[in-house]
Image (spheres, rainbow, N blue to C red):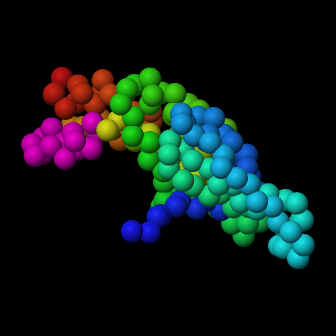
């Protein structure tokens, strides 16, 4: 099976973004940086790509110039959290300089969309009892940073 790597194209912030992401997620690192040479679309010596890992998952960030670097919500990176402390930390650090949206979604300062949610959310939304799943959905859409306790109260009908 071929390996699939997420490739993120920025205007000129690839290294800055990669360094931010590896500072936020444990077990993460920069694996390598390539630079543009002569005759390239960016000035010689400018960072072209940054290969990095976030908790063992490989990514590549590219400085592609102003043609690139326009991210949309149609693609997002999802962070599956187990505790409220994780949700709060990732939401705060990733949205710093960006913006929080509804339902645990946010944009970082580079415009990359993230979803920061507890793993239990999917189980609650998929509950065979449509009343429970509807209550959870209704609670979730009113939240910016997801509250596990708030989801649990909605799930249990409290």
Residue 94 visible in image: no
Given the current orientation, which residue lies at the most extreme left position? 129
Q: Residue at x 22, y 42 (%)?
A: 123
Task: Decide which of 87, 3 is in the foreground and name it.
Answer: 3
Residue 133: in magenta span: yes
Number of numbered discs overlaid on the protein picture: 0
Q: Is residue 149 above or below residue 116?
A: above
Residue found at x 35% / y 41%: 141
Q: Quadrant of residue 37?
A: bottom right
- Magenta residues span 120-134
- Magenta stretch encompasses residue 104: no
Question: Image check: 48 left or right of 26?
Answer: right
- Name, please, the residue furthest toward the front: 1
| Residue at screen point 16% across, 27% down | 156
**Residue 41, position as x, y percentages in the image:** 83, 73
What residue sits 27% from the left and 44% below the top? 122
């Amino acid at each position: 099976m071929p390996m699939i790597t997420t490739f993120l194209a920025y205007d000129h912030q690839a290294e800055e973004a990669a360094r931010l992401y590896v500072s936020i997620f444990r077990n993460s690192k920069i694996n390598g940086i390539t630079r543009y040479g002569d005759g390239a679309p960016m000035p010689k010596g400018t960072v072209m790509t940054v290969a990095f890992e976030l908790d063992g998952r490989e990514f590549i960030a590219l400085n592609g110039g102003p043609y690139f670097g326009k991210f949309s919500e149609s693609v997002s990176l999802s962070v599956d959290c187990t505790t409220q402390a994780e949700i709060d930390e990732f939401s705060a650090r990733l949205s710093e300089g960006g913006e929080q949206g509804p339902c645990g979604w946010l944009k970082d300062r580079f415009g990359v969309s993230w979803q920061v949610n507890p793993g239990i959310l999917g189980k609650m939304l998929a509950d065979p009892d449509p009343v429970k799943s509807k209550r959870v959905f209704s609670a979730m859409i009113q939240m910016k940073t997801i509250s596990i306790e708030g989801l649990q109260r909605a799930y249990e009908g409290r």
